[in-house]
Amino acid sequence: MKNSLGKNLFFDLKMGLYGAVIMAFIVYLINADHDPAGALTAAAKQFVYTCIMGGVFTKMVENIAIKWEDKWTSLILAVVIPSLITIAFTYFMHTLRGTPEPLNSTVPTTLTAPISFSVWAYLKRSELEHQTTENFV
């Protein structure tokens, strides 16, 4: 199944992997002072979680950003909905065993998700508008 941009409807592997590497490194640094093994556990969980959910959430951002005719409704919803879900899920994952600082480990996601989702939503909406313009020429 494909979306309006002709891309996979459910998952973006490349963006999932990019986000996973960055977020795992940050989470490791946050937790390294407590216990290197605990920090590695937290970073590994963050990597797996971000790879899977990051691929799903960036695709969610893309799909919402191109969903409605009204550009601003699409862009706002494409940032707010995935950001709230990813922050909540990230905190939940870190409250499970193995993360010495679950709240602090969620801070990078809280700061970066809305910003990165905003950029991604804008890029995908621009891609749709460019594609639509090309179809009319």
Image (spheres, grey):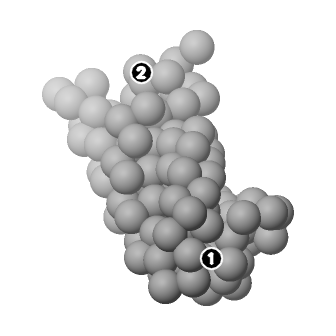
The amino acid sitting under disc 1 is Thr
Q: Residues within 10 Å of mark 2 (few under 14, many from 20)?
A: few
- Helix, strand, or loop for circle 1? helix
State which quadrant residue 25 falls in: bottom left
The circle drawn on residue 106 is 1
Q: Residue at x 43, y 32 (%)?
A: 13
The amino acid sitting under disc 2 is Gly
Q: Residue at x 54, y 51 (%)?
A: 44
Would you say 114 lies left or right of 42 here?
left
Q: Is residue 69 above or below residue 107?
A: above
Residue 31 visible in the displayed image: yes
Q: How far across and down, in percent of the image, does residue 55 sit?
A: 52, 40
The circle drawn on residue 23 is none
Q: Nearer the viewer, residue 101 or 77?
A: 101
Q: Residue at x 45, y 43 (%)?
A: 16
Q: Which residue is mark 2?
A: 6
